[in-house]
Image (spheres, rainbow, N blue to C red):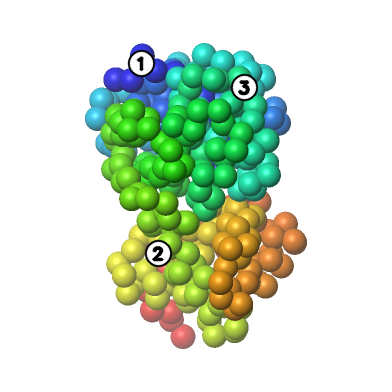
């Protein structure tokens, strides 16, 4: 078990709450922090209600634990300093915005000078963060996937100067969490899986934006063709359409194809505040979205 290391997770959104719960379940003393106290409360409700039980009961952990034992290892902090000062590893899981992340890592560099610092960014490489981190050999990307108990994998990617020691530590931690650890060779915008996923996501959005199909039909055909458990629009709702839109903006900022622009359907939904599962409405309506209906993949009766 990883009880000798302390992990701090900064940001209690969809990924932050899951990473912190997984770390605690894997035996690590874990502290969760968010700038907004109400966000922490919401995260703890989700962690206690369904996330920790799902992780513990998934069979993914190399060392079995109980929900009660795992929960005893997870605490929250009222300040960033209180969360990270004694941490051996800090995982940043905040907004997918480079300027926001730079401000955060400037603070982490000062408050946790000896910790391994990682960003859970799903599209932004960690190289730009070296501008504000004194010892970049301790900096890297650790890209987790939601839900962690079903997508049990993590990608590790260098900031350009990451030490082998930092990689080895995170490989050990990832494996203790029951994850398949994939090291990205060199630096790749979108890492490994997100380069593939983005092509699927972008074309799915275009099919709907151009009026050639509905989200339900895209998801239904995708699952039937590939034998997948989940599908593009279902996944985007889970991630959060605001997060998806932020990722698309970061890709567009370095795009070489003039046609590679954020898709209007997605932009309109974010502006309307329909952000997916977390707001009760996205491409589907929650709870009980159509994509989770037992008959979703069956022929419709006319």
Residues at marks 2 and 1 touching, judged by CB atoms closer than 8 Å: no
Q: Is residue 205 above or below residue 173?
A: below
Residue corresponding to mark 2: 196
Depth check, mark 3 against mark 1: the one in front is: 3
Front-most of residues 148 and 283:
148
Q: Residue at x 61, y 77 (%)?
A: 258
Depth check, mark 2 against mark 3: the one in front is: 3
Q: Earlier in the sequence, mark 2 or mark 3?
A: 3
Residue corresponding to mark 1: 3
Left or right: where 122 falls relative to 151: right
- For label 1, the crowd category at 10 Å Cα-Cα, with few meaning under 14, some 14 to 19 and many 20 or more, is some
Q: Is residue 241 above or below residue 202?
A: above
Residues at marks 3 and 1 touching, judged by CB atoms closer than 8 Å: no
Q: Check disc 3 and report its element: helix, strand or loop.
A: helix
- For label 3, the crowd category at 10 Å Cα-Cα, with few meaning under 14, some 14 to 19 and many 20 or more, is some
Residue corresponding to mark 3: 110
Q: Earlier in the sequence, mark 2 or mark 1?
A: 1
Q: Residue at x 49, y 19 (%)?
A: 114
- For label 2, the crowd category at 10 Å Cα-Cα, with few meaning under 14, some 14 to 19 and many 20 or more, is few
Residue 149 showing in the rendered view: yes
Front-most of residues 159 and 260:
159
Q: Residue at x 29, y 20 (%)?
A: 1
Q: CA distance from mark 2 to mark 1?
A: 35 Å
Q: Position of residue 21 (x, y in %)?
A: 45, 30
Q: Residue at x 44, y 43 (%)?
A: 160
Front-most of residues 137 and 89:
137
Q: Position of residue 43 (x, y in %)?
A: 58, 33
């Amino acid at each position: 078990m990883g009880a000798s290391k302390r992990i701090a997770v900064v940001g209690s959104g969809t990924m932050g709450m899951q990473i912190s719960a997984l770390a605690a379940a894997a035996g690590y003393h874990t502290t969760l922090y968010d700038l907004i106290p109400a966000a922490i409360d919401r995260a703890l409700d989700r962690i206690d209600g369904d996330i920790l039980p799902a992780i513990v009961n998934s069979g993914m952990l190399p060392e079995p634990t109980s929900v009660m034992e795992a929960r005893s290892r997870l605490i929250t902090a009222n300040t960033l300093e209180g969360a990270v000062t004694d941490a051996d590893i800090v995982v940043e899981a905040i907004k997918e915005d480079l300027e926001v992340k730079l401000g955060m890592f400037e603070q982490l560099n000062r408050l946790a000078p000896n910790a391994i610092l990682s960003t859970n960014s799903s599209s932004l490489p960690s190289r730009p963060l070296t501008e504000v981190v004194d010892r970049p050999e301790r900096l890297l990307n650790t890209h987790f996937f939601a839900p962690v108990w079903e997508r049990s994998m993590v990608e590790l990617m260098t900031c350009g100067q990451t030490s082998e020691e930092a990689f080895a530590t995170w490989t050990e931690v990832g494996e203790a969490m029951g994850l398949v650890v994939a090291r990205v060779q060199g630096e790749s915008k979108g890492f490994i899986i997100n380069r593939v996923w983005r092509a699927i996501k972008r074309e799915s959005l275009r099919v709907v934006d151009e009026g050639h199909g509905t989200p339900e039909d895209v998801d239904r055909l995708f699952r039937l063709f590939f034998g997948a458990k989940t599908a593009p629009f279902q996944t985007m709702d889970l991630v959060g359409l605001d997060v998806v839109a932020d990722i698309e903006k970061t890709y567009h900022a370095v795009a070489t194809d003039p046609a590679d622009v954020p898709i209007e359907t997605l932009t309109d939904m974010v502006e309307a505040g329909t952000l997916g599962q977390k707001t009760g409405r996205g491409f589907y309506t929650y709870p009980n979205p159509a994509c989770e209906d037992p008959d979703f993949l069956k022929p419709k009766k006319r």
